Image (cartoon, rainbow, N blue to C red):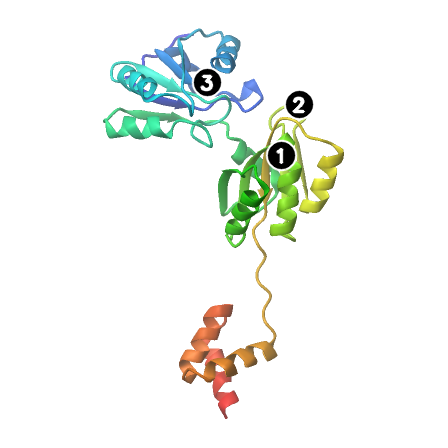
Amino acid sequence: MNTPALAPGLYIVATPIGNLGDISRRAIEVLAACAVVACEDTRVTGGLLHHLGLKRPLRRYDDHASDAAREGLLGEMMHSPVALVSDAGTPLISDPGYRLVREARARGIAVTTIPGASALVAALTLAGLPTDRFLFAGFLPNKDKARGDVLADLAAVPATLVFYETGPRLVASLEAMAQVLPGREIAVARELTKLHEECRTGTAQELAAHFTAHPPRGEIVLLAGPPGAPEKPAEADIDAELRAALADLPASKAAGLVAKKHGLDRKALYARVMELKG
């Protein structure tokens, strides 16, 4: 390979999430040219480099890396190109690395991204859920109460929710979604880009039953569709709220209060207030 020279700095390199054919030509060139490759697991990255026919010095860098390890990499970047990879996918997406990137930028070290595979984006393209707005929230907590609390906090977000999950915890998370996010369309995407890639959709109850009977393996992306539009309140209920508001507020403010609560037209409600008063 005719490897181009690279300027000193930090190179964030996305690696395959399953299918090794998904690595980009640019990513290979950068890995071949870097003086050091910082990675979560030297065995995993070593296997990828072996597949690519490359041999580069590997430096472990994960969530448990010491300040001294980070300083060592920052010092290396001052005069040499350093690559940062995760075990799979795009670094920093629910993976270690943001402190390294933040400190490199603070010190004026050039930071370059080499984009590629990302499990959350791959899952969004398969699930058939709305993608105009989505919220990625990493892994749900392991304990039942904390898991339910997180889902409750996100329940009103008008977006598709995306989580990473593992096989042994999937059914518990689906059961929590059935309680906290009833009626939502749920998708489970697993084995992405691999031979047995699967994306199954349905209600949380349906999926929990399926995966109880067929325990999943591997890493999983769990998605929940956005909340539906709230039902329009009945006219009699609106009238009751307007009368209650009129007990303490002038007509214009009573109309504005109820309009804001239900997302209704203020002028139309003001006209209705005047009818009720008449």
Q: On screen, 59 above or below 62?
A: above
Q: Amino acid at mark 3?
A: Arg
Classify 10 Å Cα crowding around label 2: few (below 14), some (14-19), many (20 and above): few
Q: Secondary structure at mark 3?
A: helix
| Residue position marked by numbered label 1 in the rendering | 169
Instruction: Please report whichever mark, 3 or 2, sits nearer to the chain's N-terminal start.
Output: 3
Extreme residue toward the left, this view: 108
Instruction: Please report whichever mark, 1 or 3, sits nearer to the chain's N-terminal start.
Output: 3
Image quadrant of residue 105?
top left
Residue at image location 42% in from the left, 27% down from the top = 96
x then y, percent, for residue 238: 55, 77
Q: Secondary structure at mark 1?
A: helix
Cα gap from disc 1 to disc 3, whole angstroms: 36 Å
Residue 25 is marked as 3
Quadrant of the rendering where the N terminus is positioned: top left
Residue at image location 47% in from the left, 13% down from the top = 42
Q: From where the camera sits, is residue 187 visible?
A: no
Classify 10 Å Cα crowding around label 1: few (below 14), some (14-19), many (20 and above): few
Residue 195 is marked as 2
Q: Give left or right: position of 60 versus 134.
A: left
